Image (cartoon, rainbow, N blue to C red):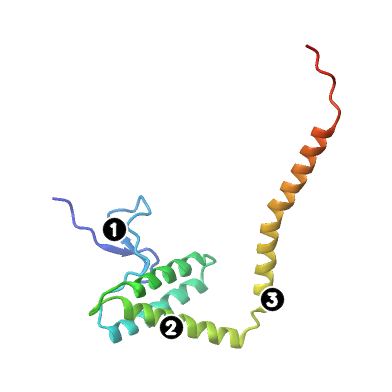
């Protein structure tokens, strides 16, 4: 009989990101919104607490992938069909808390320079391959247009 596995936190201060303790060698069995199924109002409180943990963790790491991944998992949990105890309340509490923090942050901080920089970086990222392709194509056309020696048979 296989040994029972328990869930362990991947990030010590974030309770909702877990994995099976028996499988540390692969990125399998990772749970990104590992919250209990609860009645809606209890779940909302759980979601607010999870938002606190994720925001606190994201403030100490440059890896924004953590937050994005948990948000995606929370949206999926909120969209799951069914009634009764579920993870929907936690998902709503989590996402609403993030929205409130975002609103407060945008009111207290001039976010425009950051987003302008992000837009410019993305535009440059998209334009670079196109510019390189045009240059490469022009060089190819020029090379093909050069007169070649006659072919001897």
- Residue 82: x, y in percent? 26, 75
Q: Give the Cα separation between the discs numbered 1 and 2.
A: 31 Å
Instruction: Locate the C terminus by quadrant.
Output: top right
User: Is label 1 in a helix, a strand or a loop?
Assistant: loop
Callout 1: 10 Å neighbours few (<14), some, many (20+)?
some
**Based on the displayed image, in which of its 4 quarters is residue 12 positioned?**
bottom left
Q: Nearer the viewer, residue 126 or 67?
A: 126
- Residue 142: x, y in percent? 82, 37
Does 61 sit left or right of 148 as displayed?
left
**Based on the displayed image, in which of its 4 quarters is residue 76 positioned?**
bottom left
Residue 132 visible somewhere in the drawing: yes
Question: Dots 1 and 3: beta carbons under 8 Å?
Answer: no
* Mark seen at residue 96: 2
Q: Nearer the viewer, residue 132 or 138?
A: 138
Q: Is residue 11 above or below residue 94?
A: above
Does 126 sit left or right of 61 as displayed?
right
Picture residue at 44% right of the left edge, 71% below the top? 71
Callout 3: 10 Å neighbours few (<14), some, many (20+)?
few
Residue, far front: 153
User: Is label 3 in a helix, a strand or a loop?
Assistant: helix
Picture residue at 36% right of the left edge, 80% below the top? 47
Residue 13 visible somewhere in the drawing: no
Q: Which residue is mark 1?
A: 21
Q: Give the Cα separation between the discs numbered 1 and 3.
A: 43 Å
Which numbered disc, 1 or 3, marks the residue that appears first in the sequence?
1
Residue, far left: 1
Q: Which residue is mark 3?
A: 113
Q: Is residue 51 above or below residue 34?
A: below
């Amino acid at each position: 009989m296989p040994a029972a596995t328990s869930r362990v936190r991947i990030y010590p201060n974030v309770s909702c990101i877990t994995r099976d303790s028996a499988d540390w060698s692969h990125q399998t069995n990772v749970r990104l919104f590992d919250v209990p199924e609860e009645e809606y109002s209890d779940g909302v409180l759980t979601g607010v607490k999870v938002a606190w943990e994720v925001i606190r963790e994201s403030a100490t790491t440059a890896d924004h992938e953590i937050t994005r991944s948990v948000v995606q998992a929370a949206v999926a949990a909120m969209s799951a069909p069914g009634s009764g105890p579920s993870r929907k309340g936690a998902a709503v509490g989590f996402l609403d808390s993030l929205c409130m923090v975002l609103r407060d942050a945008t009111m207290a901080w001039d976010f425009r320079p950051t987003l302008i920089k992000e837009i410019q970086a993305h535009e440059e990222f998209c334009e670079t391959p196109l510019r390189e392709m045009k240059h490469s194509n022009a060089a190819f056309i020029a090379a093909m247009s050069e007169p070649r020696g006659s072919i001897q048979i």
